[in-house]
């Protein structure tokens, strides 16, 4: 979008990077490096300046040399024309010209692509069409344009098989219409970039496709809260509503058909007050029985499968925390497990969990779908423990339920009922429950996911600090659940 380009060039400081971007970037770099081995020997023309930035002029010169000396496969082949620059991830000599291969780290199932995978694939159409156009402007005949991504169906067996890890999607047909429109788009981009004043930004579904780093900037003038804060509404529906002039919560109440929870959220935000359905909460609590096990997993999700019988982006639990309330009024017990970085943690974690949680126990998770999915996958990986693991799974109750059903709502919860939103709303100013009081290395699940696989490369002191930070973080997650449960009991006079 030329408007996005304008912000990138003229107001880069307004971008707010999603905390997951760095992780995705690291995954993308690793995937890109592996993909360079797909077609045999290659030459990577990347050149960096002393400050770490790319030396574009040197990359253009190296590309030229490779082309004239007949190199078969060039990685990061760079071209510039008409004020535009691009680097093709892989350029390969093929019959009739060159094959263009754009490498992306998303996973795609060639046998049965899911809707979100197809959407992801289609989101690269414009990018690939522009590259093809620029290469041809530079006199490079493109024999075929392709997208290279991770094969979602690949299961690692033994050492990594790069040929099976990737899938190549021919994109010639998909980009045809976009390719024809590139000259017009290029002219429009040039026009917008030359503007001194900021062009008008039109919010659209594209804003969430990446997601866009300029979202906060582009929505800075909207009333707070606004239609984009509504609980559990598709982003596409929010965009539709916004395009029809539904912006504030007043508008939403007047003109949208809201779910009961969305309506309650909007009314509480506008008129203040809280909603506590004591009977509903008591019914939920009445379904629980001592001893209670409060369980939380931490997982990693490597783009490239690290362990036997795992797929790209498979979530692998490496840690859990467990608080146990034996009976009414008894003190809490705590158990935990943290795997060894660099080894497959699933088997030792499953064994430890089966020791810590007996069968038929009442287990509480917050957003149980996640824990249930992990338990099912663990059962698949450890068939001899499957019965016990599936029993734990069958007995999990969801502490999110009272909030998701609108039985307990405070305006401070906003539009999210994640534990990170509910906790500070229920316990403002409680230092013991403040995630910001933890070691800055691990204050959220994304950081835990990113840092655990890296422990194996750290020195002893650093590794010790990270492990302690991970344990403290996960412990706080289950302590938070205990506190939330106690608050629910108080709310309906059971404590
Ligand atoms: S948030 Fe949306 S409108 Fe703003 S720059 Fe990004 S894509 Fe464009």
Image (cartoon, rainbow, N blue to C red):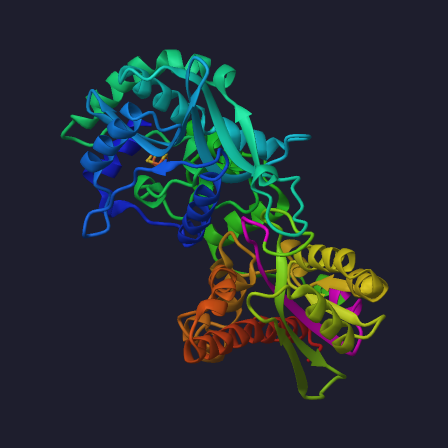
Residue, x 33% and y 27% (percent of image)?
1
Q: Residue furthest front?
A: 69
Q: In this view, does 320 lie to the left or right of 42?
A: right
Please provide percent x and percent y for residue 465.
44, 78
Q: Does the magenta stretch include residue 130?
A: no
| Depicted 43 relative to depicted 172: above or below | below
- Where is ligand 1, by quadrant? top left
Which residue lies at the image location 39% right of the left edge and 71% below the top edge? Answer: 440
Residue 446 vs 29, above or below: the answer is: below
Instruction: From the viewer's perspective, tell me whether residue 10 is left or right of residue 70.
Output: left
State the residue in front, 475 or 155.
155
Residue closest to the eye, 310 or 121: 310
Span of residues in magenta: 283-305
Q: Give x and y (percent) for residue 342.
A: 56, 65
Please state the horizontal and vertical placement of residue 322, each as a whole percent of the image.
66, 75
List the single residue furthest toward the left.
196
Residue 317 visible in rendering:
yes
From this view, report whether residue 495 is shown above or below residue 105.
below
Residue 459 percent coordinates (x, y): 42, 75
Residue 85 in view of the camera = no
Work out which quarter of the rendered image holds the C terminus and state it.
bottom right
Based on the displayed image, in which of its 4 quarters is residue 206 positioned? top left
| Point 42% across, 51% down: residue | 26
Examine the structure image and report whether residue 292 is included in the region drawn in magenta: yes
Question: Residue at the location (34% across, 16% down)?
Answer: 182
């Amino acid at each position: 979008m030329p408007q996005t380009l304008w912000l990138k060039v003229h107001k880069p400081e307004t971008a707010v990077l999603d905390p997951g971007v760095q992780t995705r970037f690291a995954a993308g770099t690793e995937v890109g490096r592996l993909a360079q081995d797909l077609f045999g020997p290659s030459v990577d023309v990347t050149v960096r300046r002393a400050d770490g930035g790319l030396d574009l002029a040197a990359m253009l010169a190296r590309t030229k040399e490779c082309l004239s000396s007949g190199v078969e496969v060039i990685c990061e082949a760079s071209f510039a024309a008409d004020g535009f620059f691009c680097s093709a991830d892989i350029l390969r000599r093929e019959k009739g010209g060159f094959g263009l291969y754009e490498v992306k780290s998303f996973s795609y199932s060639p046998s049965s692509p899911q809707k979100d995978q197809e959407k992801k694939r289609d989101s690269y159409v414009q990018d690939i069409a522009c590259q093809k156009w620029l290469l041809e402007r530079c006199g490079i005949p493109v024999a075929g344009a392709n997208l290279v991504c991770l094969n979602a169906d690949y299961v690692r067996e033994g050492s990594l098989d790069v040929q099976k890890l990737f899938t190549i999607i021919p994109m010639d047909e998909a980009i045809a219409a976009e390719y024809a429109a590139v000259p017009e788009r290029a002219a429009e981009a040039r026009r917008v970039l030359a503007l001194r004043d900021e062009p008008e930004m039109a919010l659209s579904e594209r804003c969430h496709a990446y997601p866009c780093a300029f979202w906060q900037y582009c929505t800075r003038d909207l009333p707070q809260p606004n239609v984009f804060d509504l609980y559990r509404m598709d982003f596409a529906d929010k965009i539709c509503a916004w395009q029809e002039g539904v912006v504030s919560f007043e508008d939403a109440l007047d003109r949208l058909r809201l779910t009961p929870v969305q309506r309650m959220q909007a009314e509480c935000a506008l008129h203040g007050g809280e909603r506590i359905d004591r009977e509903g909460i008591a019914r939920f609590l009445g379904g629980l029985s001592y001893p209670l096990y409060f369980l939380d997993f931490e997982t990693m999700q490597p783009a490239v499968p690290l362990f036997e019988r795992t797929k790209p982006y498979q979530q692998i639990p490496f840690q859990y925390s467990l608080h146990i309330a034996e009976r009414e009024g008894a003190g809490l017990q705590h158990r935990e497990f943290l795997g060894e970085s660099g080894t497959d943690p699933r088997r030792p974690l499953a064994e430890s969990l089966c020791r810590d949680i007996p069968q038929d126990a009442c287990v509480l998770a917050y957003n149980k779908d996640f824990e249930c999915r992990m338990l099912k996958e663990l059962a698949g990986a450890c068939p001899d423990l499957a019965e016990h693991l599936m029993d734990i799974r069958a007995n999990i109750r969801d502490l999110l339920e009272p909030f998701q059903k609108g039985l307990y709502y405070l305006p401070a919860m906003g539009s999210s009922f994640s534990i990170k939103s509910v906790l500070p709303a229920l316990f403002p100013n409680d230092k013991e429950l403040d995630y910001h009081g933890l070691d800055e290395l691990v204050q959220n699940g994304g950081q835990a996911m990113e840092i655990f696989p890296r422990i194996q490369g750290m020195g002893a002191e650093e590794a010790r600090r990270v492990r302690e930070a991970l344990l403290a973080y996960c412990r706080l997650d289950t302590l938070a659940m205990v506190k939330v449960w106690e608050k629910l009991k108080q709310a309906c006079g059971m404590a």
